[in-house]
Amino acid sequence: MTAVGDLGAAEAALPDRHPLVRAIAQAGLRRGGADPAEFYRLLARREPPAPGAIAGLGETGGVEDAGLVRRWLAHPGARGRVEAVRALRRLGVTRPAELVPLLRDESGAVTRQVVAALRHDLGALDPEMLEALLRPGNAPHVRFAGYRLLTLANAWQRLATNLRLIDDPDDRLRVGARADISSWLNRQAATTYHGPSRDRAAELDKLIERARPILDEDKVRLLRFHAGLPHQAAI
């Protein structure tokens, strides 16, 4: 497949699902004087293209290919949507507005890729929209996507989100929230130099007290201290 002149075999392997196979095929075409991106552009115009073709275009194309990749955010297969999000990330042309709807995708693999793409654009995301993802009626992977993005923001939003979920029926969210509160107290709290806003502090006050029966008293005391809240003894 990699010998000069054996372009047919290399071309056939271009849309393979495995990245290593694609990389070998791309190298074979380049040695033969061909540009693999040109082949991927043709493959990506098919209805629908193989997921590996979308991935390959992200690996070999440029920003000018963003429009062609974007249309496959609506690929009928979850793997195709995953590769479209991943390709846009590789090309450096992700747009929060076009990715946010995919946070409610039926596939957890898609929402994970969207979270990875949006984590660097948190300032462009509406916290109320993210909190809506956490509603109990949503699919577990949708709720977890909202949780991940909310807790990647500032410390006080992270803490409030964790406290809200400290007794959630979803095991993954409940266990994750409790562990993240402990992690924050142990690793980041002492270097969180800016306190919460007045409204956030009032919210944290209520959430910490609601969580008091679940958290040990030492954690409650530390949470109140770091949030700038007055000490309040257990009743």
Image (cartoon, rainbow, N blue to C red):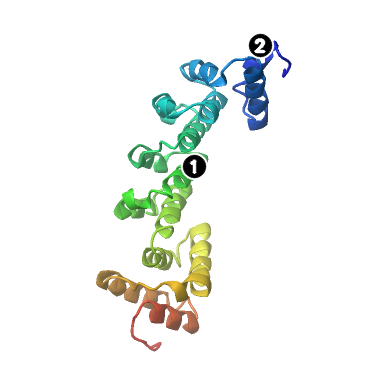
The residue identified by callout 2 is 8
| Amino acid bearing label 2 | Gly
The residue identified by callout 1 is 113
Label 1 or label 2, whichever lies nearer to me, is 2
Q: Is residue 117 left or right of residue 5?
A: left
Give the percent coordinates (x, y) of residue 94: 40, 38
In the depicted view, which residue is nearer to us: 203 or 158?
158
Q: Residue at x 40, y 42 (%)?
A: 104
Q: Could you tell me if residue 125 is visible in this image?
A: no
In the depicted view, which residue is nearer to us: 90 or 52?
90
In the depicted view, which residue is nearer to us: 38 or 173?
38
Give the percent coordinates (x, y) of residue 70: 40, 29
Give the percent coordinates (x, y) of residue 10: 66, 17
The image shows residue 222, relative to residue 178, as above or below, that is: below
Instruction: Pick whichever of labels 1 and 2 is earlier in the sequence.
Output: 2
Decide: few, some or many residues near mark 1? Use Cα within 10 Å; few <14, some 14-19, many ≥20.
Answer: many
Give the percent coordinates (x, y) of residue 168: 45, 62
Decide: few, some or many residues near mark 2? Use Cα within 10 Å; few <14, some 14-19, many ≥20.
Answer: few
| Amino acid bearing label 1 | Gln
